[in-house]
Amino acid sequence: MRWLDRQGIELTGNNYFPFYSVYALMFGPNAGALFGGRRILVVTSTTPEKRKGLELGLRRRGARDVQYLEVSPTRAMFDRLDIGRIRRPVELVLIGAGVGSAAVLGQVRSLGAVAIDAGFALDAIAFPAKRWNRPYCVPDAEFDVRQINFLGLEDIAMHRRILVGRGEASSLLNQIESIVRARTRQQQMATRVEGGKGEVVG
């Protein structure tokens, strides 16, 4: 907070949003308005496989042009970007640089484009199966409760306590709990089989 004060940045409803809003923006029903026809710059650390996935995913979402600036996978905070080699105009900058994203945001300011610290969302675009690991990354039309991976039994218990406190019930929560318990049993069994060198114990 002291840093924000020194920079003269006042947090308001116009500049401070829950982080999940980024996922909803990039994967929600209005994502086409964000990507469609845009000249996009992606600033992140990639592998050939990730870059191929990003290119395919962004093009499918309607991107007009996609450029990349690589950052260090572990020291992005200290990277100095070669902004001069970027074709202009750029209309949208998507950043995935961990804690280094704050430094990257300052360096891309001269592009005059909207810049988003997209983080995990870039991985989820490149590798669509990862969308099931976080909430708000799968549109309602594709949602399949059997595939979600971001809720554990402790999370479910917490949500159940909230619902009980409200005097409410949720058949969806019951369904999720059954799936998570079955998945947990499978994982425990696989661990026991591995520990027993191929023999199921118990």
Image: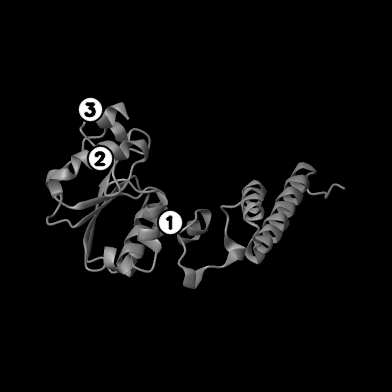
Residue placed under numbered mark 1 in the picture: 124
Type of amino acid under label 1: Ala
Instruction: Give 173 or 10, whichever is nearer the viewer.
Output: 10
Between the residue at mark 2 and the residue at mark 3, the CA separation in whole angstroms equals 19 Å
Residue under the point 76% across and 50% down: 189
Q: Quadrant of the N terminus?
A: top left
- x and y percentages locating residue 25 in the rendered image: 35, 59
- Place of residue 24 in the rendered image (x, y in percent of width and height, measured from the top left): 40, 59
Compared to residue 10, the image places residue 145 above or below, namely below
SS label for mark 1 = helix
Nearer-N-terminus badge (1/3)? 3
- The part of the image, by quadrant, that contains residue 38 is bottom left
Q: Give whichever of 46, 88 is nearer the camera.
A: 88
In the image, what residue type sits under mark 2? Val
Q: Residue furthest bottom?
A: 141
Please provide percent x and percent y for residue 192. Answer: 77, 45
Other-residue count near label 1 (Cα within 10 Å), few / some / many at <14 / 14–19 / ≥20 = many
Q: Mark 2: few, some, or many residues within 10 Å (few <14, many ≥20)?
A: many
> What is the spatial separation of the Cα atoms under label 2 and label 1, in whole angstroms?
20 Å
Cβ atoms under marks 2 and 1 closer than 8 Å: no
Q: Position of residue 173 (x, y in %)?
A: 64, 60
Please name the residue that numbered disc 3 is placed on. Answer: 6
Circle 3 residues within 10 Å: few <14, some 14–19, many ≥20: few
